[in-house]
Image (spheres, rainbow, N blue to C red):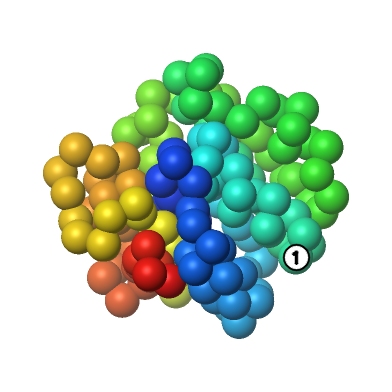
Amino acid sequence: MRVALTATQQGINGRQWTTLYDVLRQLKPALFIHGACLGGDDQGDSMAADLGIPRIAFPSTIGKKRVPDDELKRRTGSLIMIMPAEQPLIRNIKMLKCAKVIEGSKLIACPRQRHEIIRSGTWTTVRHGRRILGTQNVIIISPEG
């Protein structure tokens, strides 16, 4: 199983952190996929590295929002690959397609809001995830954890 993460740029809170950690420990994914954005993606990458889960990063072309490649490479654990930078909405679909290679793979979303909004990269990725991976394979960890 592969797990893709989409998370708020403001960073996930303590309750989301605990729940994400528990979910990753339970699922034991073979691969952790994320968008290499500062905030929640960066926190998720660090967590996956600590858990020894191999990771693939799909960075954005928006340099000021991106975790530096050197930082991703420096972490313990297996960093499989850093993909070429792409526009955020394009790279999010590529992340989901990378996850879909294995049936039953999941998208985990850690949004800033508990309700879906239109102008949000996290919620846009959730909508694409429901279509690409199936609604049953999208896990939303609300701000309340």
Side (left or right) of 52 relative to 96? right
Please name the residue shown 26% across and 41% down the image: 120
**Element type at marker 1?**
loop
Q: Where is residue 140, by image quadrant? A: bottom left
Q: Residue furthest bottom?
A: 26
In this rendering, is residue 132 above or below 40?
below
Q: Position of residue 107 (x, y in %)?
A: 42, 62
Please name the residue shown 20% across and 60% down the image: 115
Please name the residue shown 44% across and 63% down the image: 108
Towards the viewer: 9 or 79: 9
Q: Position of residue 1 (x, y in %)?
A: 56, 70
Q: Where is residue 92, by image quadrant? A: top left
Please name the residue shown 43% across and 50% down the image: 6
Quarter placement of the C terminus: bottom left
Side (left or right) of 139 relative to 69? left
Towards the viewer: 13 or 41: 13
Q: Is residue 100 visible?
A: no
User: Which residue has dot 1 on it?
Assistant: 51
In this rendering, is residue 113 above or below 84?
below
Side (left or right) of 4 relative to 30? left
Q: How many marks?
A: 1
Side (left or right) of 117 relative to 62? left
